[in-house]
């Protein structure tokens, strides 16, 4: 019989694409998902894009019995079930910790207690574990910047200054073995997920591989969920004829990686020889600005975006983080292939086939503002 792969959170964006690739590669696939209403709407069934050969199990990773029964017969495990909104995590702490941390603990406890022998456990971690990406100061060399001060953000100092000599630094690739210093509760939960997995690897020999995804985008990224996925959020705003707000004057840099590249990394990390506990960045290695995203979306949709730039910022956001890709290249011979322009085109073509839901992004801003996590430079322009 073909080996069975279980994907927790497998109805979602990255999970569903991974499920399809696993089926194509000859595996049996089971998905365990609680169909979070924030992503699918209330009372929704499993999404119709899931292939009928995928075994869909409705259940919660926080529920021990659901997890024990979903694990039956499993050889490969992809743990993707998580809440993923960085901003939302900053005030919805209990939900994020319950789902992301307790959910991972439940899964590991179920594996240990059922004495299940699995061939590989892939954890979907995040670049959020680093906090600010690695920077270089021309006087002091490599630095791992601490969280930016609110008082600096209010003065429009969005860039990263050197903690020692105070001059402006430049962003350089963020390597896996540097210190972890998350800026957000989401980042803390991903770091704790990693630590739980390392504990299980060290104490029980669980064959864990940790993949730190950078900013993933592509078809099936929820158009309903206003809390996560900048490409989906912008497209939704543009399709509704609304303006797009850019924060920190559009200066932040991110590493966007298309979901099909992430899926290839997932399958390689599952099937190739790797030491237990191997931790790899999954990114493109290329820095893109928010303006680059808007330009690519405008080109692919043929619509010009109206941009709002009031010097606003969100506490919990980082300024820049770009993947160092040398480790994954060396160990898995992996390189992301899809350019931003082509990837955005794929996403837009898919979005054209979808009902674009009412845009509810403003709600997320109001929620952040209500708890004091949304700010702006005093004048709205940089000092
Ligand atoms: N998308 C990105 O840019 C990105 C970047 C870094 C890391 N990640 C990580 O990758 C993983 C997948 O992310 P995604 O973008 O596909 O997110 P997604 O929201 O599309 O998918 C997550 C899935 O998990 C399910 N889920 C949530 N709570 C659950 C629970 N308690 N029990 C069972 N299922 C539950 C949701 O219903 C959803 O189907 C997550 O762990 C996320 O932290 C994503
Ligand atoms: Zn310096």
Image (cartoon, rainbow, N blue to C red):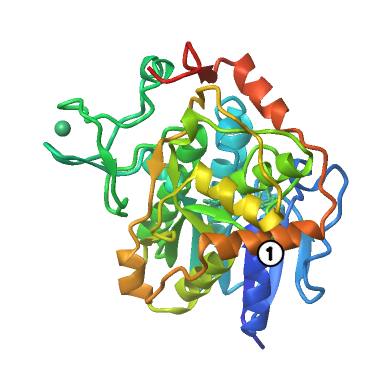
Few, some or many C-alpha atoms within 10 Å of disc 1 (few <14, some 14-19, many ≥20)?
Answer: many
* Residue 300 drawn at (x, y percent): 66, 57
Depth check, front residue: 258 or 292: 292
Q: Residue at x 37, y 55 (%)?
A: 323
In the image, taking residue 331 as reference, residue 301 lies left or right, namely right
- Find residue 46 and report its horizontal and vertical position in percent: 82, 58
Q: Is residue 253 left or right of residue 138?
A: right
The quarter of the image holding the N terminus is bottom right
Q: Can residue 277 be seen in this view?
A: yes
Residue 338 percent location from the top left of the image: 52, 68
Is residue 8 or residue 145 the one in the foreground? 145
Corner quadrant of residue 5: bottom right
Tell me the quarter of the picture where residue 77 sits.
bottom right
Residue in front for this viewpoint, 2 or 158: 158
Q: Residue at horizontal 40%, vertical 48%?
A: 195
- Residue 185 vertical position relative to residue 265 in the rendered view, above or below: above
- Asked if the beta carbon under badge 1 is closer than 8 A to the nearest atom of ligand 1, the reply is yes
The residue that appears at 32% across and 50% down in the rendered structure is: 174
Q: Looking at the rendering, in which quadrant would you find the C terminus?
A: top left
**Residue 264 horizontal side relative to residue 54, left or right:** left
**Residue bearing mark 1:** 16
> Height in image: 267 above or below 171?
below
Determine which quarter of the picture holds residue 157. Answer: top left
Task: Name the spot of residue 179 as percent of width and height, x first.
Answer: 28, 43
Is residue 71 visible to the viewer in this orientation of the structure? no
Identity of the residue drawn at 86% across and 50% down: 44
């Amino acid at each position: 019989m073909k080996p069975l792969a279980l994907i927790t959170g497998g109805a979602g964006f990255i999970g569903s694409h991974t499920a399809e690739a696993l089926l194509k590669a000859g595996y049996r696939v089971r998905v365990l998902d609680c169909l979070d209403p924030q992503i699918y709407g209330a009372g929704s069934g499993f999404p119709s894009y899931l292939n009928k050969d995928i075994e869909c199990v409705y259940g919660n990773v926080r529920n021990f019995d659901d997890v024990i029964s979903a694990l039956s017969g499993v050889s490969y495990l992809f743990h993707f079930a998580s809440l993923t909104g960085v901003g939302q995590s900053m005030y919805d702490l209990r939900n994020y910790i319950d789902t992301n941390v307790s959910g991972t603990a439940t899964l590991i406890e179920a594996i240990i207690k059922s004495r299940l022998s699995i061939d590989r456990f892939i954890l979907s971690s995040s670049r959020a574990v680093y906090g600010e990406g690695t920077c270089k100061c021309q006087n002091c060399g490599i630095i791992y910047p601490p969280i930016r001060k609110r008082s600096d953000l209010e003065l429009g100092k969005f860039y990263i200054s050197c903690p020692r000599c105070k001059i402006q630094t430049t962003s350089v690739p963020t390597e896996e073995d540097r210190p972890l210093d998350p800026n957000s509760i989401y980042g803390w939960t991903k770091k704790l997920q990693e630590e739980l997995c390392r504990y299980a690897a060290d104490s029980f020999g669980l064959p864990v591989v940790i993949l730190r995804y950078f900013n993933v985008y592509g078809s099936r990224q929820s158009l309903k969920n206003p809390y996560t996925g900048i490409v989906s959020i912008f497209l939704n705003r543009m399709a509704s004829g609304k303006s797009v707000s850019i924060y920190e004057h559009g200066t932040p840099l991110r590493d966007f990686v298309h979901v099909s590249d992430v899926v290839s990394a997932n399958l390689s990390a599952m099937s190739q020889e790797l030491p237990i506990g191997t931790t790899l960045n999954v990114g493109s290695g290329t820095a893109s600005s928010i303006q680059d995203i808007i330009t690519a979306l405008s080109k692919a949709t043929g619509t010009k975006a109206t941009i709002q730039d009031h010097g606003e910022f969100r506490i919990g956001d980082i300024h820049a983080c770009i993947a160092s890709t040398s480790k994954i290249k060396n160990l898995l011979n992996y390189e992301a292939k899809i350019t931003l322009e082509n990837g955005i085109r794929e996403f837009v073509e898919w979005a054209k086939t979808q009902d674009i839901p009412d845009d509810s992004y403003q709600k997320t801003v109001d929620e952040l503002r209500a708890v004091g996590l949304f700010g702006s430079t005093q004048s709205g322009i940089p000092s």
